[in-house]
C-alpha cells in the first residue's frame, strides 16, 4: 500500500529528484542564510538535512540588514533541482534583485559554481532535452524559453513563446515543474479555484516541447486536514518505477508543509492518488534541535538575512555584538533561527546580559510578522524580563514595523535569565515564560501568530540581540533546549 506522506514543518516549494539510491529535495529559503537547503531520503518517509547550496547571494545592503533595508518576503524563491550529464543544477529567481541564479556542481555537497541567466523568470523549471536547455516559467502566462549553450541567457533565435495561459482572480497558473517522460512533455502547475482560495494542481502535456499543451486539473484535495488544498510541486520516479508527487499545503502559522501523494501514469497521463487517503508522518532529522553553542552553530540554524560574522563569536556560548541601533527585532543583525514544527513545540535558552547597554534587548522569539518575544532588557535602573508582541497591520504583504507593544516587564535582581516559548499550532498561538527562582512564570498573554506574505515563511524560533539607543554592547546565549 502506498500512503500519503505528510511533513510537520515549513519546507515550501519542494522540488525532488532521485539519484544514486536517494531522493533529494530542495526548498525555498527566502531571506534565510545559508540558503538553498537540500534534504535527503532513501524512501520518501525518512529525511535528513544534507547540504546548502550557497552562503550568500549578492551581499546587498538589504540582504545584510544594513540601515533600515531588508528583503523580507523576497530573496530566493522556488528552486528547480536537476541532474544532467554528470552535473547537478539549481536555478531560482532572486525576488529582491530581480535576477535569476543558476548554480552547478558535480556533487550535491558542493562546491557550487554560480552564474546568472539574463532576465527574470518567475518560478522557473529547468529541463534538458536532446542537448538543449529550456526554462518553463511565469504567472498566468506560462512561457517556454530556450537557453544558450552556457546557460547564461536566452538563445538568440531559440524557442521563446507562451505555451499555457489562465486568468484567475485568486491565482493564475504558476509554480512550473517540467519533465519529459516516455517521449511526452509534462508541465505541472498550481492555480486556485476560481470562486475561493484553494490550491489545485494542474498538469498539461504535449508530444512536442513547444506544444500545443493540453490538460487541466489533476489533484484537488486536502486529505481531510484543512481546506486549503495541496499543490505546487512536481513528480519523481523512484527505483521501483513508481511515481510520487511532492507538493505542499498551506498550514497556518507553522508554514507550508510538504505532502507526498502517490501517482501512476495512465496512457501517458499522471493520475494522482490511490483511492486510499491514509496519511503517515515523515520524519526529518537535522533541521531543528538543541544546541550548546560549544564550537559554532549546528547545521539546522539559519541566519535571518546574511550575517556579519565579525559580530559573532563563541565564548562560553553564542555571543552577538551590535554595530547599529534598531527600532525593532526585524532589523536585528545576526538573528539565528530554526524551524518550528506542528502540532506543538517549545524551546528555552539562557541569556547573559552583563555586556548590554541601556535600551538593548536580547530575546527568544516566535519569529514571524506577528511575533512574540521574551527576553531581557536593560533600563536606566537595571535589568528587566520583557515580553513584547507585534500585530501586523495593513495589507498581507506589508511589514508592520511600528506596532510592537510591550506586554509585561518584571524587574530582575541579576543580569542572567532563562526564557522560553511554547507554540500550539492547533490554535496558532505562542506563549512566553521566564524562569524565576527556578520556576517557569508566564509573561504576557498567549499571542496569535498569522502566516502572512510580509515574511512569507512559517514561524521560527529565533535568538536575537539589538540596540535601541547605543550600539556596541553584547549578549551571550547558552543552553538552547528544543522540546
Image (tube, rainbow, N blue to C red):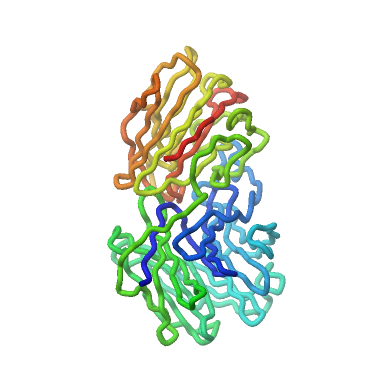
- Residue 133, percent across and down? 63, 75
Q: Is residue 312 above or below residue 19?
A: above
Query: Residue furthest toward the top?
Result: 381
User: 452 or 140: which is nearer to us?
Assistant: 452
User: 462 or 109: which is nearer to us?
Assistant: 109
User: With 253 as the anchor, is 302 left or right in this view?
Assistant: right
User: 167 or 86: which is nearer to us?
Assistant: 86
Q: Is residue 174 above or below residue 72?
A: below
Q: Residue visible at 49% across and 14% down?
A: 380
Quadrant of residue 227 in the image? Answer: bottom left
Give the total number of marks visible in the rendering. Answer: 0
User: 51 or 308: which is nearer to us?
Assistant: 51
- Residue 45, percent across and down? 44, 62
User: With 217 as the anchor, is 99 left or right in this view?
Assistant: right
Q: Quadrant of the C terminus?
A: top left
Q: Residue visible at 50% across and 31% down?
A: 327
- Residue 118, percent across and down? 66, 65
Q: Residue visible at 41% across and 75% down?
A: 263
Q: Quadrant of the N terminus?
A: bottom left
Quadrant of residue 460 in the image? Answer: top left
- Residue 155, percent across and down? 67, 75
Q: Is residue 213 above or below residue 50?
A: below
Q: Is residue 32 above or below residue 101?
A: above
Q: Residue visible at 51% across and 68% down?
A: 138
Amino acid at each position: 500500500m502506498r500512503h500519503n506522506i505528510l511533513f510537520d514543518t515549513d519546507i515550501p516549494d519542494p522540488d525532488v529528484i532521485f539519484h544514486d539510491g536517494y531522493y533529494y529535495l530542495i526548498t525555498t529559503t527566502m531571506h534565510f542564510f545559508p540558503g538553498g537547503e537540500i534534504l535527503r531520503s532513501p524512501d520518501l518517509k525518512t529525511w535528513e538535512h544534507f547540504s546548502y547550496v550557497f552562503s550568500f547571494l549578492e551581499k546587498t545592503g538589504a540582504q545584510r540588514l544594513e540601515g533600515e533595508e531588508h528583503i523580507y518576503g523576497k530573496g530566493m524563491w522556488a528552486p528547480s533541482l536537476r541532474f544532467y550529464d554528470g552535473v547537478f543544477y539549481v536555478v531560482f529567481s532572486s525576488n529582491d534583485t530581480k535576477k535569476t541564479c543558476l548554480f552547478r556542481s558535480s556533487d550535491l555537497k558542493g562546491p557550487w559554481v554560480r552564474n546568472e541567466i539574463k532576465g527574470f523568470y518567475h518560478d522557473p523549471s529547468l529541463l534538458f532535452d536532446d542537448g538543449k536547455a529550456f526554462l518553463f516559467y511565469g504567472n498566468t502566462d506560462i512561457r517556454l524559453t530556450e537557453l544558450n549553450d552556457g546557460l547564461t541567457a536566452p538563445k538568440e533565435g531559440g524557442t521563446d513563446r507562451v505555451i499555457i495561459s489562465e486568468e484567475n482572480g485568486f491565482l493564475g497558473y504558476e509554480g512550473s515543474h517540467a519533465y519529459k517522460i516516455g517521449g511526452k512533455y509534462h508541465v505541472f502547475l498550481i492555480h486556485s479555484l476560481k470562486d475561493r482560495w484553494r490550491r489545485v494542481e494542474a498538469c498539461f502535456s504535449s508530444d512536442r516541447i513547444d506544444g500545443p499543451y493540453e490538460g487541466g486539473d489533476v489533484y484537488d484535495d486536502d486529505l481531510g486536514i484543512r481546506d486549503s488544498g495541496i499543490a505546487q510541486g512536481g513528480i519523481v520516479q523512484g527505483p521501483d518505477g513508481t511515481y510520487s508527487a511532492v507538493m505542499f499545503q498551506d498550514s497556518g502559522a507553522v508554514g507550508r508543509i510538504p505532502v507526498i501523494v502517490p501517482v501512476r501514469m495512465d496512457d501517458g497521463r499522471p493520475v494522482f492518488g490511490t483511492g486510499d487517503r491514509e496519511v503517515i508522518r515523515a520524519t526529518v532529522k537535522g533541521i531543528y534541535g538543541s544546541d550548546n553553542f560549544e564550537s559554532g552553530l549546528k547545521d539546522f540554524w539559519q541566519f535571518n538575512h546574511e550575517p556579519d560574522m565579525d559580530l559573532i563569536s563563541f565564548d562560553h556560548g553564542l555571543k552577538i555584538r551590535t554595530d547599529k541601533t534598531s527600532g525593532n527585532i526585524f532589523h536585528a543583525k545576526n538573528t539565528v533561527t530554526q524551524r518550528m514544527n506542528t502540532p506543538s513545540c517549545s524551546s528555552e535558552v539562557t541569556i547573559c546580559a552583563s555586556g548590554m547597554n541601556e535600551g538593548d534587548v536580547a530575546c527568544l522569539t516566535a519569529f514571524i510578522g506577528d511575533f512574540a518575544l521574551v527576553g531581557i532588557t536593560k533600563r536606566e535602573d537595571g535589568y528587566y524580563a520583557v515580553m513584547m508582541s507585534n500585530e501586523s497591520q495593513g495589507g498581507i504583504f506589508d511589514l508592520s514595523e511600528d506596532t510592537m507593544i510591550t506586554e509585561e516587564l518584571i524587574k530582575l535582581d541579576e543580569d542572567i535569565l532563562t526564557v522560553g516559548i511554547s507554540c500550539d499550532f492547533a490554535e496558532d498561538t505562542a506563549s512566553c515564560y521566564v524562569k524565576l527562582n527556578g520556576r517557569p512564570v508566564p509573561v504576557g498573554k498567549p499571542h496569535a501568530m498569522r502566516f502572512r506574505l510580509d515574511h512569507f515563511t512559517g514561524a521560527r524560533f529565533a535568538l536575537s540581540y539589538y540596540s535601541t539607543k547605543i550600539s556596541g554592547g553584547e549578549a551571550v546565549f547558552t543552553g538552547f533546549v528544543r522540546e
